[in-house]
Image (spheres, rainbow, N blue to C red):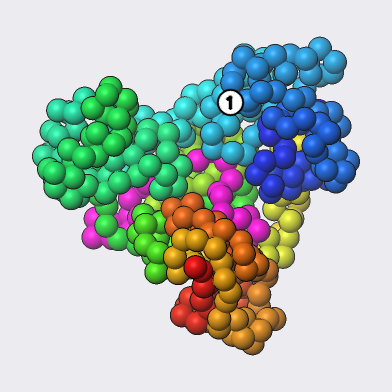
Amino acid sequence: MNVIFVEPAFPNNQRQFVRGLREAGANVIGIGERPAEYLDDQLRHWLYRYEQVPSVVHEGALMAAVKRCQSREWIDRMECTVEAHTLPTAKVREACTIPGTSVRTAFLCRDKPAMKEALREAGVPCAQSIGTNDPQEARQFAAKVGYPVIIKPRDSAGAAGTVKVHNDEEMDAAIHSSGISRGFQAALEEFVDGHEGFLDTLTIKGQVVHEFACHYYPNVLEAMRTRWISPQIITTNRIDAEGYKEVRRMARTVIKALGIDTSATHMEWFFGSKGLKFSEIGCRPPGVGAWDLYCAANEFDLYKEWGGAVVHRRPSQQLSRRFSAGMIALRPECDGIISGYSGTDYLESINEWIIDAHLPSPGTPTQPVEAGYMANAWVRVRHPDFDHLRGMLNTIGQRVRVHAR
């Protein structure tokens, strides 16, 4: 089978999807932005061919590269795993009559207001929402649902560009900063309180074959705006517990409503005073190294399993569910240059449970808090007991300090 994979080199973990396809037996044809000579030996070994384009989100350039590939050999599939690549890839895939995620599905998984409208019609509980480029309509929506209100780009991922608005004055500022005042489209949503988590799946022919339930501590918007917090993401090995049944059922309804066939998915949800509410979905794997946590927690190779789903349309591995696994982000005490660490003796004391860690060396420039969970230092840990794991991560957050000047 000949499979095109869009952008095999960046970010760095993209190579693992190439490896997964190769190990599943595919001839992997990479289309990316780097010159071929910039690819390392390992990645070149896994690739059957490579096409360079100026931008993988430029549909014309991407289509020209795909047609060059089709002129040489039959192309069976065309895949991507980065949020920003999903819609242009789907449009080119459909235009070139290659099987895979449809333009409709990719659009609904990118455009937040359209996504929620489709899911409400399918009976999925969602926050009230609109898409607008009209300041007056934005103010009317806030008056209708009440503050606070969430404003974000229609095609946002994570908390990028997201603001929480508490009053009319903040609404006026957000209308300006979001571009609504200049005619740009944005998504407005009713604020939903409660605990935030996500459920990820590997889906084959519309059926969930593997799933993983995860929790944010604290919720993403707070974590991405507050320096002193050392935020955690934890995947549980208790997914068969009664408390997860409702969100697992909801995930299957979402997959059916959006027409997802064979793909990884990433679904965010909230549970609070208004019950379980669906937040959003990406028709791609999660970010922040979540798949590495799933591999470590379940003692299997999810990248190879995904490759097998694409190539053979069937699962081949069993999940052990032996561990819960989590990561904790450690923020520098200020922006500047990392000067050192304290409290790392605790990491040595729990070494048997540590999956891996990233502690940038002194002299490394810091990254801003909003750059994400893996922008600075981080530690990944697993343990058979979810509560014990949470305790270890809490202790890391309390004791390990990243000093900067």
Name the residue at 59% across, 38% down. Answer: 82
Residue identifier under label 1: 57
Please say whether residue 240 is visible from this viewpoint: no
The location of residue 265, given as percent across then percent down, is: 55, 44
Using the image as rendered, state which of residue 310 and residue 166 is in the foreground: 166
The location of residue 230, given as percent across then percent down, is: 45, 69
For residue 32, side relative to residue 223 (left or right): right
What segment is highlighted magenta in the picture? Answer: 270-293
The kind of residue on which mark 1 rests is Val
For residue 385, side relative to residue 99 (left or right): left
Name the residue at 62% across, 39% down. Answer: 81
The location of residue 75, given as percent across then percent down, is: 77, 22
Figure check: 158 above or below 111: below
The location of residue 365, given as percent across then percent down, is: 57, 58
Which image quarter: residue 194?
Answer: bottom left
Classed neighbour count for the residue bearing mark 1: other residues with Cα under 10 Å, few (<14), some (14–19), many (≥20): some
Which image quarter: residue 121?
Answer: top left
For residue 236, side relative to residue 217 (left or right): right
Instruction: Count the labels in the image.
Output: 1
| Quadrant holding the N terminus | top right
Name the residue at 85% across, 46% down. Answer: 42
